[in-house]
Amino acid sequence: MEVVKRASAKGCVVTRSPEETQALGHDLALLLQPGDVVALRGDLGAGKTCLIQGVCNGLQVEDVVNSPTFILVNEYAGKIGTTDVPVYHFDLYRLTHPAELVDLGIEDYIDAGGVSLFEWAERGAELLPVPRWDIELVQTTDDERRISWTYGR
Ligand code: ADP
Ligand code: MG
């Protein structure tokens, strides 16, 4: 039952403010389970960090959530229900080759049972495991973002 629900999880919305994007992230967080991988694609300013702030809020993270651009990964303490779940926030913008993810110990992070969130997921390409959430953000006007998501392989 659960598998069917997640396999068919997909959608698309247009948000008209950072707050609406964060609210969407909060809603999407309610679909997440420990071990999930979330791959976000979209240009600079598309709203990836903004959406992740909402996801982290939905995962009961109390730390300040900002892009880990210089150190590649931030770790936060999250929860799903009453279960403690680590949240790993990667920003692959500065990755020069997907293989660097191996050096970073990406498999250990993913196997640790946390939720792994990737900005600039396209730079990690085929090294990001499936099944996973894929989220694409497109800036349509100054304040509008078209955000679509799917879960699967
Ligand atoms: P990214 O991480 O993709 O580079 P950020 O989330 O850091 O993007 O930045 C998005 C920027 O766009 C912020 O300055 C935010 O205030 C602005 N913005 C305007 N409208 C929206 C919207 N609908 N959703 C998200 N961000 C928006
Ligand atoms: Mg960002």
Image: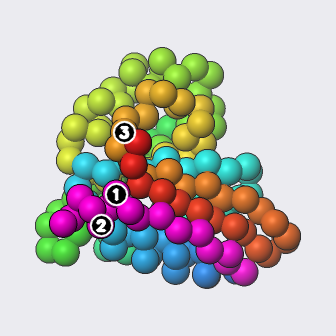
Q: Residue at x 52, y 80 (%)?
A: 23
Depth order, front residue of 140/76: 140
In the rendered structure, are the residues bearing label 2 and label 1 in contact, judged by CB atoms less than 8 Å apart? yes
Quarter holding the N terminus is: bottom left
Please tell me how crowded label 1 is: few (under 14), some (14-19), or many (20+) other residues with Cα within 10 Å: some
On the picture, is 88 further left or further right than 46? Answer: left
Give residue 130's mark.
Answer: 3
Please tell me how crowded label 3 is: few (under 14), some (14-19), or many (20+) other residues with Cα within 10 Å: some
On the picture, is 80 further left or further right than 15? Answer: left
Q: Amino acid at mark 2?
A: Lys
Please tell me how crowded label 2 is: few (under 14), some (14-19), or many (20+) other residues with Cα within 10 Å: few
Residue 34, position in %: x, y? Answer: 23, 55
Q: Is mark 1 within 8 Å of ligand 1?
A: no
Q: Residue at x 59, y 36 (%)?
A: 122
Does residue 74 appear in the picture of this structure? no
Depth order, front residue of 78/6: 6
On the picture, is 95 further left or further right than 14? Answer: left
Does residue 152 appear in the picture of this structure? yes
Q: Amino acid at mark 3?
A: Val
> In the figure, 95 relative to 70: above or below?
above
- The residues tagged by marks 3 and 1 sit, at their Cα atoms, a distance apart of 12 Å
In the image, the segment drawn in magenta is: 1-16
- The residues tagged by marks 2 and 1 sit, at their Cα atoms, a distance apart of 6 Å
Q: Was residue 12 drawn as part of the magenta stretch in this picture?
A: yes
Q: Amino acid at mark 1?
A: Ala
Q: Callout 2: helix, strand or loop?
A: helix
Q: Callout 3: helix, strand or loop?
A: loop
Residue tagged 2: 5
Residue tagged 1: 7
Residue 56, position in %: x, y? Answer: 41, 67
Q: Residue at x 73, y 49 (%)?
A: 43
State which mark lies toward you, 2 or 3. Answer: 2
